[in-house]
Image (spheres, grey):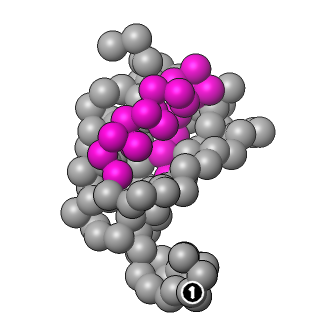
């Protein structure tokens, strides 16, 4: 099963560090980084600010190790880490993702 795993960071540098580590470890085939605006509650107060969303293409088998690596590298006390199942997509692309991700390396 192919997954799209998301997290957010405060800085582009943190996003790039996490993205590079996940791809180098072969836990994600690729990572998109997008600047976004976030509004959320933290410690009882409404916060608003700029964040960077990472969307990582991976497999269900690699998810546990990917989440562990994200947690190790993340600067947030409570990082948002969540996954969506890719229900359908280009067969060639999904085959490429599965071929690039190897949680055993």
In the image, 28: left or right of 1?
left
- Image quadrant containing the C terminus: top left
Q: Is residue 47 above or below residue 91?
A: below
Is residue 8 within the magenta segment?
A: no
In the image, 65: left or right of 88?
left
Q: Position of residue 75 (x, y in %)?
A: 32, 58
Q: Element at badge 1?
A: strand
| Residue at point 22%, 63% (across, down) | 13
| Residue at point 54%, 76% (across, down) | 43
Q: Which residues are magenta?
A: 55-74
Residue 5 in view: yes
| Residue at point 41%, 48% (across, down) | 31
In the image, 35: left or right of 41?
left
Find disc 1 in the rendering and name its residue: 45
In the image, 103: left or right of 1?
left
For residue 22, which quarter of the picture? top left
Q: Position of residue 11 (x, y in %)?
A: 29, 70
Is residue 66 within the magenta segment?
A: yes
Q: Is residue 39 above or below residue 35?
A: below
């Amino acid at each position: 099963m192919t997954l799209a795993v998301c997290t957010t960071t405060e800085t582009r540098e943190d996003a790039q560090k996490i993205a590079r580590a996940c791809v180098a470890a072969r836990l994600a085939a690729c990572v998109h980084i997008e600047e976004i605006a976030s509004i959320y509650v933290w410690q009882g107060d409404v916060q608003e600010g700029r964040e960077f969303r990472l969307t990582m293409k991976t497999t269900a088998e690699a998810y546990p190790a990917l989440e562990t690596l994200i947690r190790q590298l993340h600067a947030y006390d409570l990082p948002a880490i969540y996954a969506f199942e890719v229900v359908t997509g280009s067969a060639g692309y999904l085959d490429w993702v599965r071929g690039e991700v190897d949680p055993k390396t």
